[in-house]
Image (tube, helix red, strand yellow):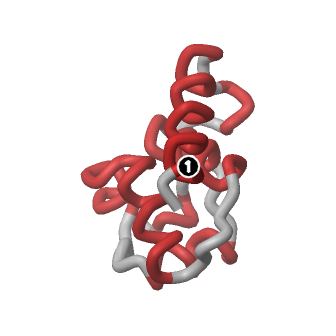
Amino acid sequence: MRTSELPNIGPVLEGHLRAAGIETAEQLRAVGAEEAFCRIRASAKPDACLHELEALAGAVEGIRKSLLSRARKEALRRYFAALNQTQ
């Protein structure tokens, strides 16, 4: 299955995933949102934002990012903040 068949993954994000070596929905689910986000930052878009991380997390779960739980969104915000502190 192509990544663009998942919620939140349009042509631009699909291109970022491809540049990061993630070609399929199965590969995205296997590496998870956080790892995929780090790979995107390393290979395609160093300034990728929290919204992109949330989109990836929703895609992994098969839901729109707006439907992520409050706890999951908070965990993603903490992860994103920690990444930005180490750069």
The number of numbered discs placed on residues in the rendered structure image is 1
Asked if 67 appears above or below 47 in the picture, the reply is above
Please tell me which residue is depicted at 67% across the width and 69% down the height of the picture: 47
Residue 77: x and y in percent read 62, 34
Q: Residue furthest left?
A: 30
Give the residue number, with chain letter if any, for mark 1: 85
48 vs 18, left or right, is: right
Tell me which amino acid carries mark 1: Gln
Q: Quadrant of the N terminus?
A: bottom left
Residue 27: x and y in percent read 29, 62
Please tell me which residue is depicted at 62% across the width and 60% down the height of the picture: 9
* Quarter of the view holding residue 46: bottom right
Could you say which is closer to the camera, residue 54 or residue 24?
54
Residue 22: x and y in percent read 37, 72
Asked if 84 appears above or below 62 in the picture, the reply is below
Please tell me which residue is depicted at 57% across the width and 44% down the height of the picture: 80
Density class for disc 1 (Cα within 10 Å; few <14, some 14-19, many ≥20) is few
Please tell me which residue is depicted at 64% across the width and 15% down the height of the picture: 70
Looking at the rendered structure, the secondary structure element under dot 1 is helix
Asked if 35 appears above or below 48 in the picture, the reply is above
